[in-house]
Amino acid sequence: MTKPISPSPPKRIYIQEVVTRDGFQAESTFIPPEEKIALINRLSHAGYAKIEVTSFTSPKAIPMLADAETVMQGIARVPGVEYTALIPNLRGAERALTVGVDEFNLVMSVSEAHNQANLKMGREDSFNALSKVINLAHANHIATNVSLSTSFGCPMSGMTPLADLMNWIDRFAHTGVRGITICDTTGMANPAQVNSVCEAAQSKYPHLQWTLHFHNTRGMGLANALAALNAGIDRFDSSLGGLGGCPYAPGATGNICTEELVHMFDLMGLDTRMNIDTLLECSQDLQKIIGRTLPSQLLMAGKVDKLHTAPCQT
Ligand code: COA
Ligand code: ZN
C-alpha cells in the first residue's frame, strides 16, 4: 500500500520590525522614551522574530535615538523575540554592551558616497571599525548581522553593480557574521534585480541568515518582497505603518509596511506567526504618536475580510 502524501507545511516567514529605529530616526519631533518603550512592548506580543529597538549612533547624527540606553533597558523582553540594535562603530558597540542586546546589527553602505554622507567615513574605515565590533561581539557571545545600505542603488551614485555588492558580502562573510541584510535604502530596486541579487548571495553563502530590507519609495516595495520570497528569502525587515527613511539619503521615504507585508503573506498561506489585528491597532495608535497619517494602505482600506454594507441608491 502506498503511503498518502502529506501536504508540505506552509513556509515559515520571519518578520523583523524596524519602526522604532528606521521609522523614528527621521521624525522631527522627539518621541519620549516612555512612548517608544510602550510601543515596543505591545509589538513584542505580535509574533515578530526580531525587533530593531534603536540605534547606538551619535546623538548629534540621530537626535531621536539619543535615548537608546533608556529604551533598551526599559522594554519588557519577550522570550522568542530577538532584540537587536543598529551599531555604526566601536563606541556604539560599547554602549550597547552596557545594556545588553541579542544582536549587533552593524551598518555600512555599498556606495562610497552614501557611506561618507551617513557615517562620515570611507568604506574601508567603516569595514575596519566594524571588524573590531565583530571581534568584540564574538568575545561577548553576541550574534552579529551587517546591514549593507544602498545595496541596489544610491541616490548620489546611481544603481549599484552586483559585483560591488558581492565584494562587500564576501568581505563580511569571512568575518564570521551570522547574517547579512541587503538594504534598498531609497527604494531603487526592481524585482528582476532583487531576483539576481538574492540568487547570487544565497548560492554563494547558503549558511548565512539573509534578510531583505526594502523601502517603498517608488512603489516597488511589495513587488520586491515577493521577488525575494520567490528567490528563497524567508526573512524581511518592515516598518509599522510604512514609516521610515534614512535622514542622510536624499529623497528617502518609508520602509515597506509591516501590516501590508503580513496581510499579503498570510493571504498567500505563508506561516508568518503574526497577529495582524495587533499590528493594525498599533499602527492606528502610531498615527497619534507621530501626529499624522501613515502611508499604510491597509490601515485605510482594512483587511480583505472587512465587509461593507451595500451603498443605497436613491
Ligand atoms: N555613540 C555616541 N556618541 C558617539 C558615537 C556613538 N556610537 N560615535 C561617535 N560619537 C561621538 C563622539 O564621542 C564625539 O563626541 P564629541 O563631539 O562630544 O567629542 C562625536 O560623536 C564625534 O565623533 P566622531 O568619531 O568624529 O564621529 P563622527 O562625527 O565622524 O560621526 C558616526 C560618525 C558614525 C558616529 C555618525 O556619523 C553616526 O552616528 N551616524 C549614524 C547615521 C545613521 O544612523 N543613519 C541612519 C541609519 S542608515
Ligand atoms: Zn532602511
Image (cartoon, helix red, strand yellow):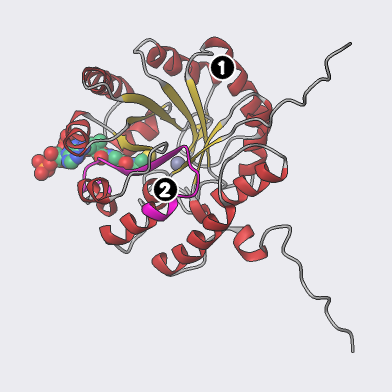
The image shows residue 200, relative to residue 289, as above or below, that is: above
Residue 253 in sight in this render: no
Q: Residue furthest bottom?
A: 314
The image shows residue 235, relative to residue 73, as above or below, that is: above
Which residue carries the number 2 mark?
44
Q: Position of residue 1 (x, y in %)?
A: 89, 11
Q: Nearer the viewer, mark 2 or mark 1?
A: 2
Q: Quadrant of ligand 2?
A: top left
Q: Is residue 141 left or right of residue 38?
A: left
Residue 223 in sight in this render: yes
Task: Magenta stretch: give its range.
Answer: 41-62
Could you tell me which residue is drawn at 29 percent across and 50 percent down?
A: 75
Amino acid identity at mark 1: Gln
Could you tell me which residue is drawn at 21 percent across and 43 percent down?
A: 58
The image shows residue 202, relative to residue 301, as above or below, that is: above
Amino acid identity at mark 2: Ser
Which residue carries the number 1 mark?
202
Q: Position of residue 85 (x, y in %)?
A: 32, 38
Crowdedness near tag 2: few (<14), some (14–19) or many (≥20) residues, C-alpha within 10 Å: many
